[in-house]
Each structure stands twice: as structure tokens, then as C-alpha cells.
């Protein structure tokens, strides 16, 4: 039983390092992206990586609160991606009818 806990902790630590590195690479793509859609995809990938960090931290610490936080982050990330995609394609987010 103790060996399994140590294995989960080690795997979570390794996953946290990998996901943090991926966040840095996506941050580079957000800054240097050749086109706006590349930057939007990189921001979406960063949101996904932050969700993965929250879930891995929940696995490591055994606290379920971080799973709830990751669900909220997933909803916010999805909505922000939809709004930015609409802004890129149409130029306006909210259209007023007169």
C-alpha cells in the first residue's frame, strides 16, 4: 500500500514537471505566434495544462477541492476560447441591433 502511494506521488511529480514545461512552450507560442489563431490555440492549450496541473496536484495531495477547481477552470477556458474565436472571426463579441 505504501509503495503504491509513493508511485502515485512520483508520477504526479513527473507529470507536474512535464505539464509546467508545456505551459512554458505554449507561452512562447502565445508571444511569438505567427498568426492570431495560433495564439488562440496556444492559450487554449495553456488553459488545458492548468487544468492538468490542478488535477495532478489533487492526486498528489489527496484533496478533492482541486478537482472542483479544475472543472471550473475547464468551463472558463472553454467559454473564453469560444469568445476569442468569435472575436477573431467576426470582429465583435456582442452585436447591438438598432
Image (cartoon, helix red, strand yellow):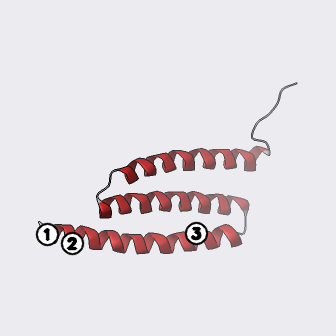
Label drawn at residue 69: none
What SS does tag 3 mark? helix
Instruction: Return the x and y of residue 88 as percentages of the image width and height.
Output: 74, 50
Label drawn at residue 2: 1
- 1 or 3: tag closer to the N-terminus: 1
If the image is split into quadrants, where does the N terminus sit? bottom left
Q: How far apart, in angstroms, are the residues tagged by discs 2 and 1?
A: 6 Å
User: In the rendered view, would you say 51 is above or below 32?
Assistant: above
Q: Is residue 15 left or right of residue 49?
A: left
Residue at the disc numbered 2: 6
Residue at the disc numbered 3: 26
Q: Residue at x 49, y 75 (%)?
A: 21
Q: Which of label 1 and label 3 is nearer to you?
A: 1
Q: Is residue 85 left or right of residue 9?
A: right
Q: Residue at x 54, y 61 (%)?
A: 45
Q: Nearer the viewer, residue 22 or 64?
A: 64
Q: For label 1, count other residues whose C-alpha is less than 10 Å away and answer few (under 14), some (14-19) or many (20+).
A: few
- 2 or 3: tag closer to the N-terminus: 2
Question: Residue 33 is drawn in which quadrant?
Answer: bottom right
Amino acid at each position: 500500500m505504501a509503495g503504491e502511494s509513493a508511485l502515485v506521488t512520483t508520477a504526479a511529480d513527473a507529470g507536474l514537471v512535464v505539464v509546467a514545461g508545456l505551459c512554458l512552450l505554449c507561452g512562447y507560442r502565445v508571444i511569438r505566434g505567427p498568426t492570431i489563431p495560433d495564439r488562440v490555440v496556444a492559450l487554449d492549450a495553456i488553459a488545458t495544462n492548468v487544468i492538468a496541473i490542478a488535477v495532478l496536484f489533487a492526486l498528489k495531495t489527496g484533496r478533492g477541492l482541486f478537482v472542483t477547481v479544475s472543472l471550473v477552470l475547464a468551463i472558463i477556458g472553454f467559454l473564453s476560447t469560444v469568445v476569442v474565436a468569435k472575436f477573431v472571426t467576426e470582429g465583435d463579441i456582442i452585436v447591438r441591433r438598432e
